[in-house]
Image (tube, rainbow, N blue to C red):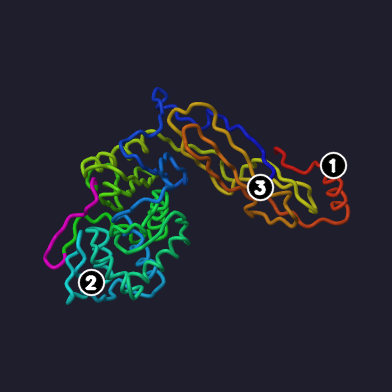
Amino acid sequence: MPVLRLLIALALLMASAAAGLAQSPYGGRAPNYFILDVGSGQVLAQQNADIPLPPASMSKLMTLAMLLDALDQGRITLSTTWNVSARAHGMGGSSMFLETRDRPTTEDLIRGLAVVSGNDAAVVIAEGLGGTEEAFAQMAQTRAGQIGMTQTTIANASGWPDPRHRMSLHDLGMLARYLIVDHADYFHYLSETEFTWNNITQPNRLPLLSAGIGLDGLKTGHTEEAGYSMVGSAHQGSRRIIFVFSGLSSMGERSEEAERIVNWAFRQFVERQVLPGGQAVAEAEVWMGAESHVPLVAAQDLTVLVPVVAQGEIAARVEYDGPLAAPVEQGAEVAQLVVEVPGLPDPFRLPLVAGHSVAEGGILPRLRTAALVLGGQLGLTEP
């Protein structure tokens, strides 16, 4: 894969308003955490994020995703009614307080999951979609893989303790992103402050919804093995973050950690434009084309998050599988700009497209290409 290394001017990317502040890696109390900026896709911080852990009630987000998928596919509606089995009614732990005589609607069950984390609601959904909770778990396992959750094994719908039931914090973050981005029309349910069923009103179990820090979803969890945990999302201005953590010892610590993460993520990073849309970054060689090169350009404005004060230069490189084979279509994504920001755990990738079309060449371009191959000169050049 040809690679071009670029240095992006530090002055174009760094914030000046907070020049006196020093950015440092996240250092809270949680032993396990994953913090993602949704807009840019950048991972801001992570620790033990790829280790499968007991997800507790946070795994109800997978059950919610399955329910919302069924809604979007037209298999059910918000007014569809559901049967409540004796098994669902008898579930312990957090509850929506469903009775076997009840016929909740889909919308009721969304609230029962999203607001009060009902284990009974989770089982009703599982049995309604899968016939049995075991069959539903297999369906959810398949769907999790499609979403990109590679460190997840699903044994039930509620997160009830089971040695087979595991999710990594990274996977929970991807699940939260899926709900926020792909099921945006339903995300407001996660922000509702209370829910009443059978004359029993319960508050939303998510802390800090009214704390004024932008927190607006998703789920908490707790088991003896996993401790107190949370997957949350917050937005301030044009930015939204997702964070997941586990391993704390009390609800109070959990609330403090959530607020600490939100403050850190929004205060320690600023958004900066890397490239304006349409700007050429480099040129790629074209195999057997009417032209020997094609410009690689940003299809749209490319922005990144950077620490308010970074240590060292922001570096970038262009990667593509090449030489590109003609014909090349204008606007086709053919390369990536890989950006490395000091202070962030991973590089991130931004798409680059062909600046114009290149048709297949005749005999002369083919001879020229053959000569370049023999000379070992095919590669990537700066514009």
Q: Considering depth in this image, is 342 or 16 the residue closer to the camera? A: 342
Marks 2 and 1, how far apart in space? 73 Å
> For the residue carrying disc 2, how many other residues have a C-alpha within 10 Å: few (<14), some (14-19), or many (20+)?
few
Q: Which residues are magenta?
A: 197-208
Three-letter code for the amino acid on which mark 3 is drawn: Tyr
Q: Is 201 included in the stretch rendered in magenta?
A: yes
What kind of element bears circle 1?
helix
> For the residue carrying disc 3, how many other residues have a C-alpha within 10 Å: few (<14), some (14-19), or many (20+)?
some
Indicate the quadrant where residue 101 lies: bottom left
Q: Name the N-terminal-most of marks 2 and 3.
A: 2
Indicate the quadrant where residue 237 lies: top left
Q: Considering depth in this image, is 117 or 38 the residue closer to the camera? A: 117
Residue 276 to residue 178: above or below: above
The spot of residue 46 in percent (x, y) is 42, 41
What kind of element bears circle 3?
loop
Three-letter code for the amino acid on which mark 1 is drawn: Gly
Image quarter of the C terminus? top right
Tag in front: 2 or 3: 2
Q: Is 64 included in the stretch rendered in magenta?
A: no
Locate residue 104 relative to residue 199 in the image: left or right: right
Q: Name the N-terminal-most of marks 2 and 1.
A: 2
Seen at 54% across and 38% down, the residue is 274
Identify residue for label 2: 87
Per the rendering, the mark at residue 64 is none
Q: Are marks 2 and 3 in contact (CB under 8 Å)?
A: no
Q: Considering depth in this image, is 239 or 120 the residue closer to the camera? A: 120
Identify residue for label 1: 375
Residue reaching furthest to the top? 20
Locate residue 71 relative to residue 345 in the image: left or right: left
Residue reaching furthest to the left? 199
Identify residue for label 3: 320
